[in-house]
Image (tube, rainbow, N blue to C red):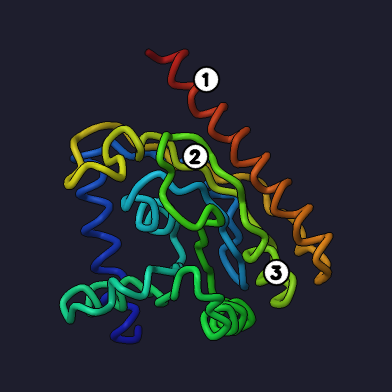
Amino acid sequence: MKDADLVYAGWRALYQLAYILLFRIRAVGVERVPRRGGVLLAANHQSFLDPPAVGMALPRQMHFMARASLFRWPLAAWALHGQHAVPLARGAGDLSAMRLAVDLLREGRGLVLFPEGTRTPDGEVGEFKPGFATVAARARVPVVPAAVDGGFEVWPRWQRVPRPGRVCVAYGEPLEPPQSNKASCVAAAAEVRRRVVALLESIRDANDRTA
């Protein structure tokens, strides 16, 4: 196993322990995520907990995009690289990051993206920007919808540190990669968002039945 893989495995074990103890995390539908080959996971964005929550629950290693400004501090950069984070210049039309995302997927890697582009201000699912669908179209990989529930309650964007709570991640069935034209990517983004919302509703219905 490569050194980078060992570091990632260490972070995954640490996150899994912390998330179980602090956030009673559970994952639903893990078997729907392909074990091999390029795959793009598109998830709603509730808090800073989301990237490790979505990726670390899976048996395969995943990459994810992180705000480029977070890499300015050496310790943060070391931790983010160890978790396979890729810097993204948000709002700048970062074509290099998009090319890197496509390259990772073509190499058979898994990639987690948050199409809303930022954390939700109110707990609701915002508009899904179609850039992720463009990446999937160019790389010709399936898209797996993923829903995070509980992250907003334990760590809303105006709160400095998280509080204990319950977080759940649900994965949907993979969708075929869209065609590489704008209309198909816009339609794919809307469909993935619809499925993420449906996953959220299923999580909350299950919680209501067990409450």
Q: Nearer the viewer, residue 87 or 9?
A: 87
Q: Quadrant of the C terminus?
A: top left
Quickly name the residue at label 3: 134
Answer whether labels 3 and 1 touch (C-beta < 8 Å): no
Q: Residues within 10 Å of mark 1 (few under 14, many from 20)?
A: few
Corner quadrant of residue 21: top left
Specify the amino acid type for callout 1. Answer: Asp
Instruction: Give how far across and how far down residue 192 sits, in percent.
Output: 67, 48
Tell me which numbered mark, 3 or 2, is placed earlier along the sequence.
Answer: 2
**Image quarter of the N terminus:** bottom left
Q: Mark 2, mark 1: which one is toward the viewer? A: 1
Q: What residue is at 62 percent from the left and 57 percent from the top?
A: 129
Q: Which residue is mark 1?
A: 205
Looking at the image, residue 101 lies above or below residue 141: below
Residue 128, position in %: x, y? 61, 51
Q: Residue at x 27, y 36 (%)?
A: 154
Q: Position of residue 193 (x, y in %)?
A: 64, 45
Give the quadrant of residue 131.
Answer: bottom right
- Asked if residue 183 lies left or right of residue 138, the reply is right
| Residue to which mark 2 is pinned | 28
Could you give the CA–CA distance between mark 3 and mark 2, rounded to whole angstroms?
Answer: 27 Å
| Camera-nearest label, 3 or 2 | 3
Front in this rendered view, residue 186 or 200:
186
Q: On residue 182, which mark appears? A: none
Q: Is 48 positioned to the left or the right of 210 in the image?
A: left
Which residue is depicted at the point 31% across and 73% down?
A: 69
- Mark 2 secondary-structure assignment: strand
Q: Secondary structure at mark 1?
A: helix
